[in-house]
């Protein structure tokens, strides 16, 4: 199968046959869908308001004379989610999506919106390859509204809790990463120094990159996890000390009893 032969580090697959009830695609590939009892609210809303309508247009388009490439290129949300393969019929080869934007890219302009409703609505009428939709809540993190988008950002290492990119940009640039924005745990670093990142396009991550070559990292470091580890470690130490104290007192008592027996 074409998907299994693809050795790239990271891309996503969309099964048009009820993706959120489909577990097979998620089992074998990184999927846009898949079933989970605790879905992320924003992603669920994105699916409802943008992904599902794009899927419907795609399915309807297969019955029209419109070419597949031009049809797929008009699906901004599916493309910004790095959907490299689309499964329409499990009996046939998957459709390769040439419009998938990849793991990260540079944009040349920014559109500020007032709230989340405007943000998710704007996704239906924008070019994600050139523009980023940003909620005004993050306006303090980005002064410039236009960029040259000159340079490259390449994913070089992928793990569920760690991502590394190599960036080479000409002038300060705005990079968009095709990863879900989740500030309660994910931290961003440029050349080892923690750097602010922010939400764009309703669900994705973005950050400003300074001129030149840089190593960009995202690390999942949830505070709750580390606090829980410390509590667990402290509890384990206290338990071991309690067991040691019990054994010490027990042995001491037995020794005293033996001494008293001998004296008697």
Image (cartoon, rainbow, N blue to C red):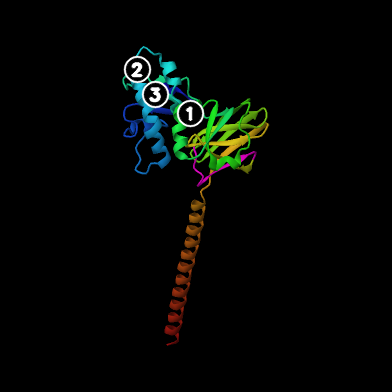
In the picture shown, does residue 60 fall above or below 175?
A: above
Residue located 47% across and 64% down the image: 240
Disc marking residue 80: 1
Q: Are marks 2 and 3 in contact (CB under 8 Å)?
A: no
Among numbered discs 1 and 3, the one appearing first in the sequence: 1
Question: The C terminus appears in which quarter of the rendering?
Answer: bottom left
Q: Is residue 188 magenta?
A: yes
Question: Left or right: 180 with respect to 21?
Answer: right
Residue 33 belongs to magenta span: no
Location of residue 31 (image quadrant): top left
Mark 2 vs mark 3: give the one in front: 2
User: Quick check: can you spot residue 36?
Assistant: yes
Q: Earlier in the sequence, mark 2 or mark 3?
A: 2
Q: Taking 30 as reference, is 216 left or right?
A: right
Residue in the image at 47% along x and 58% along y: 232
Crowding at dot 3, Cα within 10 Å, few <14 / some 14-19 / many 20+, comes out as: many
Disc 2/disc 3 C-alpha distance (Å): 12 Å
- The residue positioned 34% from the left and 43% from the top of the image is 37
User: Where residue 233 sits: x, y (%)?
Assistant: 50, 58
Circles 1 and 3, Cβ within 8 Å, touching? The answer is no
Q: Which residue is mark 3?
A: 86
Q: How many marks?
A: 3
34 vs 260, nearest the viewer = 34
**SS category of the residue bearing label 2:** loop
> Few, some or many C-alpha atoms within 10 Å of disc 2 (few <14, some 14-19, many ≥20)?
few
**Which corner quadrant of the image does residue 45 belong to?**
top left
The residue beneath circle 2 is 62
**Bounds of the magenta span?**
180-191
In space, the residues marked 1 and 2 are separated at their CA atoms by 21 Å
């Amino acid at each position: 199968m074409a998907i299994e032969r693809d050795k790239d580090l990271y891309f996503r697959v969309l099964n048009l046959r009820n993706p959120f009830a489909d577990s097979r695609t998620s089992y074998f590939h990184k999927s846009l869908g898949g079933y989970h009892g605790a879905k992320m609210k924003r992603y669920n809303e994105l699916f409802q308001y943008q992904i599902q309508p794009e899927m419907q247009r795609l399915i309807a388009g297969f019955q029209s004379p419109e070419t597949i490439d031009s049809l797929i290129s008009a699906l901004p949300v599916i493309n910004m989610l790095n959907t490299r393969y689309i499964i329409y019929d499990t009996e046939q080869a998957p459709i390769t999506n040439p419009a998938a934007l990849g793991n990260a890219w540079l944009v040349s302009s920014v559109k500020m919106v007032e709230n989340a409703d405007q943000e998710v609505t704007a996704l239906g009428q924008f070019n994600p390859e050139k523009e980023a939709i940003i909620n005004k809540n993050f306006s303090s993190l980005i002064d410039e509204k236009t960029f040259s988008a000159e340079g490259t950002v390449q994913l070089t290492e992928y793990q569920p809790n760690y991502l590394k990119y190599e960036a080479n940009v000409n002038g300060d640039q705005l990079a968009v990463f095709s990863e879900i924005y989740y500030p309660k745990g994910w931290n961003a670093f440029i050349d080892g120094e923690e750097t602010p990142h922010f939400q764009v396009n309703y669900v994705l991550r973005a950050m400003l990159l300074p001129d030149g070559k840089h190593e960009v990292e995202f690390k999942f470091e949830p505070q709750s996890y580390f606090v829980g580890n410390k509590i667990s470690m402290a509890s384990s130490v206290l338990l071991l000390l309690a067991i040691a104290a019990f054994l010490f007192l027990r042995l001491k008592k037995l020794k005293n009893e033996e001494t008293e027996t001998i004296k008697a």
